[in-house]
Image: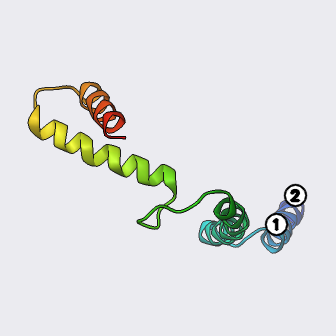
């Protein structure tokens, strides 16, 4: 009976060793692997995006520049009307930016 339990334990340990050889060693290794793969993937896609979107004056893509302007305008509106809700502030900021164009 003891021999059978020892054999089962030996098989479990061998299975764990085989699994460790096939998979990354730890969560940190998995994280590093995903970061490397993500960086490689994003480099490929950002090069394609750069050719399709022209950078703005600040060097940011157009959508980021638009969001930045909206946020800055929302801060100005919020300072003028501190009792307004977030939705009211952003609606007014969008309206002011549309009028400025």
29 up-or-down from 48: above or below = below
* Towards the viewer: 11 or 61: 61
Q: Residue at x 32, y 34 (%)?
A: 99
x and y percent of residue 68 in the render? 36, 51
Image location (x, y in percent) of residue 18: 85, 70
Identify the residue at horizontal 36%, vertical 34% (top origin): 98
Residue 53 placement, left or right of 58: right
Residue 69 sits above or below residue 31 on the image:
above
Residue 46 x %, y %: 66, 64
The label on residue 19 is 1
Label 1, secondary structure: give it: helix
Quarter of image, res 10: bottom right
The number of numbered badges drawn on the structure is 2
Screen quadrant of the C terminus: top left
Label 2, label 1: how many angstroms apart (C-alpha)?
27 Å
Q: Quadrant of residue 97?
A: top left
For label 1, count other residues whose C-alpha is less than 10 Å away and answer few (under 14), some (14-19) or many (20+).
few
Task: Give left or right: position of 31 versus 10.
Answer: left
Q: Which element is circle 2 on?
A: loop
Q: Residue at x 24, y 31 (%)?
A: 89
Q: Nearer the viewer, residue 17 or 31?
A: 31
Q: Which mark is residue 69?
A: none
Q: Earlier in the sequence, mark 2 or mark 1?
A: 2
Nearer to the camera, 64 or 10: 64
Q: Which residue is mark 2?
A: 1
């Amino acid at each position: 009976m003891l021999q059978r339990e020892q054999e089962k334990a030996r098989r479990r340990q061998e299975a764990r060793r085989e699994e460790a050889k096939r998979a990354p060693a730890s969560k940190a290794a998995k994280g590093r692997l995903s970061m490397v793969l993500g960086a490689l993937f994003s480099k490929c896609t950002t090069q394609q995006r750069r050719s399709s979107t022209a950078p703005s004056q600040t060097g940011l893509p157009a959508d980021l520049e638009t969001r930045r302007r909206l946020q800055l305008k929302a801060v100005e509106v919020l300072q003028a009307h501190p009792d307004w809700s977030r939705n009211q502030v952003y609606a007014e900021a969008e309206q002011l930016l549309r009028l400025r164009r």
